[in-house]
Image: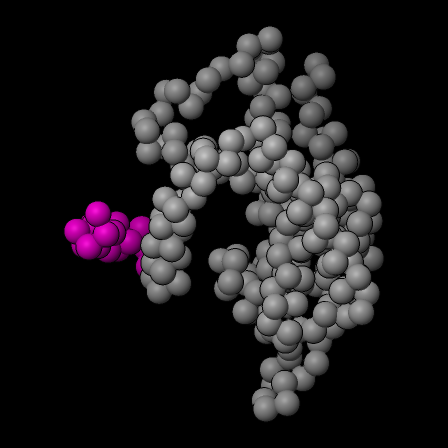
Amino acid sequence: MGNKYAVLKQLIDLYESFELENNQLDVLNFAEWIVSKSHEEPELQEKIADKKISARNPGASVPFKNHFDDKIRFLEAAAGIARYHESYIRKALKDMVINSRLEFLFLQAVDMLERAKKTDLINIYHLEYTTGMDTIRRLINNGLLFEIQDETDKRIKLLIMSDQGRVVYEQAQKRISDESTMFFTAISDNKWKKVLPVLEEIDDFHNEVFQKHNAKPFAELSNLMDSLKHLYK
């Protein structure tokens, strides 16, 4: 019976977080906020599924990944590492104005660029438009970023970090550094350093494809990948 209302309980918890981050408390904004959060935190969509699996298999940990082929296992391992990293960061940033990896990355990008267009931030991290804009809106509403007009093109607005934003960013930097140290504490440096060049090569390859061809449908992307395989293998 407890699992029957798991989704409702999760919605209540999410609404509490929504109240802390937003001034306009209505159903439409709440729905948009949930969609944005689901992109930033994929684990939100997995919590209920995990509870259902546990209910069907009490006390059992089913190694589902072992049923996948090696390529899927590789991709799922990379995705899992990203989820753990995201979860730890949220814990590290607890009680701060920002509470997600994406908000920190946006502040970091603005700090490095000094002045940035909203689309710059969205494109750098390959985000859905709504996810990026929702994150930027939260940073502006919390007084961490503000907008100015581009001196050369008055139609363009640029994002700049506020004094408060810089204080928060510097505090967050320390916590993010602590999180990365903690993440690898029990992992041999030799092991993750061996994997790093391979992951970066794969990331660089797909980054280029994404930047140039993301608008193409899956069939065209598949053909493109097939034509490129002889150049990269």
| Image: magenta residue range | 216-233
Of residue 34 and residue 206, the one placed in the foreground of this image is 206
Quadrant where the image shows the N terminus: top right
User: Which residue lies at the image location 39% right of the left edge and 20% below the top edge?
Assistant: 66
Where residue 176 sits: x, y (%)? 67, 47
Residue found farthest to the front: 190
Of residue 87 and residue 171, the one placed in the foreground of this image is 171
User: Which residue lies at the image location 59% right of the left edge and 39% below the top edge?
Assistant: 85
Would you identify the image quadrant in which residue 129 lies?
bottom right
Of residue 26 and residue 137, the one placed in the foreground of this image is 137
Of residue 125 and residue 217, the one placed in the foreground of this image is 125
User: Which residue lies at the image location 67% right of the left edge and 20% below the top edge?
Assistant: 4
Q: Is residue 184 magenta?
A: no
Q: Is residue 46 visible?
A: yes
Instruction: In the rendered view, tell whether residue 176 sits above or below residue 73.
Output: below
Residue found farthest to the top: 59
